[in-house]
Image (cartoon, rainbow, N blue to C red):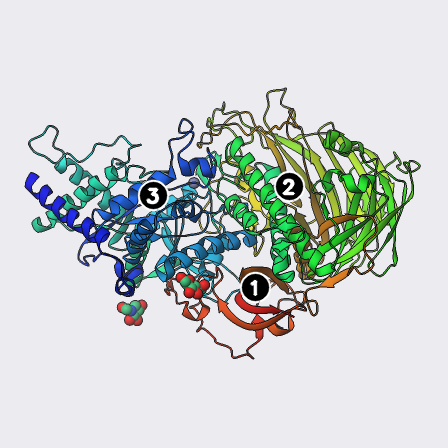
Amino acid sequence: MAARTQQLAAALLFILGGVLSFPLSEDTQQTATCGYESCHATKSNMLNVHLVPHTHDDVGWLKTVDQYFYGDLNDIQHAGVQYILDSVVDQLLKNPDRRFIYVETAFFYRWWRQQSSSMQQTVKQLVNEGRLEFVNGGWCMSDEATTHYSAVIDQMTMGLRFLNETFGACGRPRVAWHIDPFGHAREHASMFAQMGYDGFFFGRLDYQDRTRRMIEKEQELLWRASDSLTPPMADLFTGILPNGYNPPEGFCWDQSCDDPPIRDDPDLEDYNVDDVVMRFIAAAKNQALVYKTNHIIMTMGSDFQYENANLWYKNLDKLIRYVNVLQTNGSKINVLYSTPSCYLQELHRANLTWALKTDDFFPYADDSHDLWTGYFTSRPALKRYERISNSNLQTCNQLEVLGGPASTKGPFGEGDSDTMKKAMAVAQHHDAVSGTEKQHVANDYAKRLAKGWQHCQVLVSNSLAALSGSTAERIYCDNLNISVCPLTESSKKFSVNVYNPLVRPVTWPVRLPVNGSAYAVSDANGKSVDCKVVPVSSVTRDVRKNRGSAVNELVFQVQAPPLGYSTYSVSLLQDGPPPASTKHRTPTAIQNKYLQVTFDPDTGLLSSLSNLETKQTVKLTQNFYWYNASDGNNSHSNQPSGAYIFRPNSSTPFIISKTAKTETVQTSVVQEVRQWFSPWASQVVRLYADSRALELEWTIGPIPIDDDLGKEVITRLDTSIETSEIFYTDSNGREVLQRKKDFRPTWRLRQSEPIAGNYYPINSRAFIKDDVDQLTVVTDRSQGGGSINNGSLEIMLHRRLLYDDVRGVGEPLNETSHIFPKGLVVRGRLLLSLERPPAAADTHRKLAQEVVLQPLLTFTNGELHPNTKLEFSGLQAALPPAVHLLTLSQWDKDLVLLRLEHQFQSWESKVNSQPVTVNLQKLFSTLEVLGASELNLSANQWKDDMTRYEWMAQTGADPLPKNSEASAAWEVTLKPMEIRTFLLRVSLR
Ligand SMILES: *[C@@H]1O[C@H](CO)[C@@H](O)[C@H](O)[C@H]1NC(C)=O
Ligand SMILES: *[C@@H]1O[C@H](CO)[C@@H](O)[C@H](O)[C@H]1NC(C)=O
Ligand SMILES: [Zn+2]
């Protein structure tokens, strides 16, 4: 035994010397065999066990991303990613058979920048030989329930771009790897397919679904992730890992584990090779029973493991040797170092047909009373901040392109979009926007977004200076939602620049905190605009505390051209507060030309909603309630509600108040009924003159906890619509999925949580409908919601909990801040529209888009220079309603990344669910498009080079042949739900 070990050591030394002493030549680059070619051979007559050494490194959770990188605060959690990468590279060099996969580019990027060029060369060689392989490869492993597709595509693009630029083709991951996210969105699968991944692996799914799939051997399947894209465009082979992402029991050899090492010297005590090998073979055979092929995968690693990689590899080397040596005695088990893509290759070679899945993996339950549906809403303020940051980032990206080089270096200094891109990418992590991190980590994400926005503000100011010709200082007011903006509060004359990031004109209401009682507003053509002054509500005064002192709000509607801005000037006409214009009586109705809402004068609550154009009316009452969060002291289970888990103590929520005190403001620009339910729950029901949506602006908090009861606050809309237990939610802001009460499309559900088990993520909209009426609710952030009763839709707005839910975060979700020491106050908006079902999408897609990408207001004090260009559009003409400009972002000098999207599903709209063609050369007003190359969705591979594994489904139509439609070079046709990605070479006209 000892002799053999020495021989091995000598061989390893030789290899080590070889790698370090020979300089890498062009030759080595050319002979690079990475990806599928670098996989170890398998044995077709045996059970092949693919050991996948890996580490799961959260981009922030119990510690911030940088604390994790350095290994700081190890008293909170022992975890240091820099040491993991150091140690793994070192250990890979010791034996060329060893493999490792790395996932989170946010960490790898941090590490890479600190390496010497010789270490970088060494790592390149490991990558070129397939010994170190990137999987997934986005900046982070995104959350799937609470993210918006736009931000997910951006974060994947950033990570994959770094890998491509650093490692070339060998750095391109073949496999998507979401081992930890708490449920899986269909839209994520669709995106991964369009990014060119050959397969997808994850670890978490509903425990009942898992059991059924084990029995039926359906843990590996083909996910058809779009009902609009032509198969196989959105088909993704999906594998469910056997142990979450952990090793089989008894085989964890990390320094953080306690399993016995392999003791293989017969002269020493406790020789255990036979025992380990027998246990391993038993585990492998057991696992093989629930999978289809003679290949199985074992994830050998877990959270932040491999900090001392020697422990793992030393034992894995031995395991492989001792298990395989039995083959000479007839054993049919073959163990090998492998990667997810090598395993996938074998599944593909098996040439089987796979079960087809077309729904999603929400909600996720890991036991009968343990539904992970609370995080759909957890940390609602962070969720809103992340969403608005995405809007601001897209504006920043667009203005970087439209303003040219002067944007990043101009009169206001040096600005960049990169800081914000990185902050947004980190915020997509499955413990970031999900709200499942510790409080100090949530603060860190918010701080990064704020810093990113500061960098963008300089860029935006420079760009607008270049486009408008005015170098007047631009002022940003990020607190308009609570009526705070020092400039508008004090200035007698100022102008407002409204930048619209959408490719069609928008009409948008503007509310500015002011102290005067009368103002004149004129548009870019000098035409006067109807404006009204209304008093700031007492609720808003309470929320803003001493951050502002405006007594009034100036309200007017602005219009902004596509991908451009319009400038409005505002002058004070009269000082002082206006005569009180609020009434303390509930009106029977408020209405504009599109909508009418009525109120119950006795309760002050909404009683009906009508669409005046389509002449339809539904009964509609709406109120606020709270579920009493389970404290864990319960006869069925001791699971409390927490950051992840929603577990109400009772299925009947408490009503906050049966009646609302009201106050009414009615003007020609806006009408609002301000409802006050309790000191911590209020709402404004608001109708602007030109809006097709009713706005419900809710303000919740501080949620009281002096009764020692955790509370999960919802608003519920109860209507006369006949919903037959069905409602609809979007998936990551894109396609819409049907949800049925107490039902899952792919297995027979035993429902044990009647409320939490019927909650689903809502990213931008949800609706209920029958044959004649569709009520759509557009949200301003991701939230959880459900339809528990016929005709009803509820949305969870805010949660405050007193217990940790025992999933690792170790803190109750009990948000306070220095401004809100008694508990966080959160404000948000829901937009309601009522339509005939066949036409509803035409309205709600547009509404949702205007909330996701909202106009950016910037202010300048005083009179503008007369030569200032007051209006600008970056487009030659508005694009058709079906087309959305998903990305316009500077890629490199003269190179711009463009994504055009068809934003309707194939069945949604008579008018808009048709293919639509755009001419790239006729798109921009200020940019000449000199060349265009098409890329995959994540922009890390040319479209022409993109070949994916094809898979056969057990049922369902076979993939149609790929149709290559010839079209004129600059013409781009988009079919329903299609996104096309281009790199454009441009010059400023
Ligand atoms: C895969 O299976 C199909 C039948 O299901 C067969 O026609 C085809 O030749 C097989 N391909 C390979 C490479 O074995
Ligand atoms: C990938 O990176 C290489 C440089 O490593 C570059 O030449 C190539 O254009 C990149 N591919 C894409 C699709 O961007
Ligand atoms: Zn994780």
Q: Which residue is mark 1?
A: 898
Which residue corresponds to the image point at 69% horizontal and 59% vertical from the top-left? 466
Relative image position of residue 101 (x, y in whole percent) = 33, 49
Residue 274 visible to an observer of this rendering: yes
Left/right placement of residue 385 relative to residue 31 reads right
Q: In terms of depth relative to the viewer, which is nearer, 514 or 867?
A: 867
Is residue 344 toward the left or the right of residue 852 in the image? left
Q: Amino acid at mark 2?
A: Glu
Between the C-alphas of marks 3 and 2, the distance is 46 Å
The residue pinned by badge 2 equals 794
Depth order, front residue of 972/964: 972
Q: Which residue is mark 3?
A: 85
From the viewer's perspective, is residue 982 above or below residue 587? below
Which quadrant of the render holds ligand 1?
A: bottom left
Q: Determine the secondary structure under disc 2.
A: strand
Above/below status of 402 relative to 482: below
Q: Which secondary structure lies at badge 1? A: strand
What is the spatial separation of the Cα atoms under label 1 and label 3, in whole angstroms?
A: 34 Å
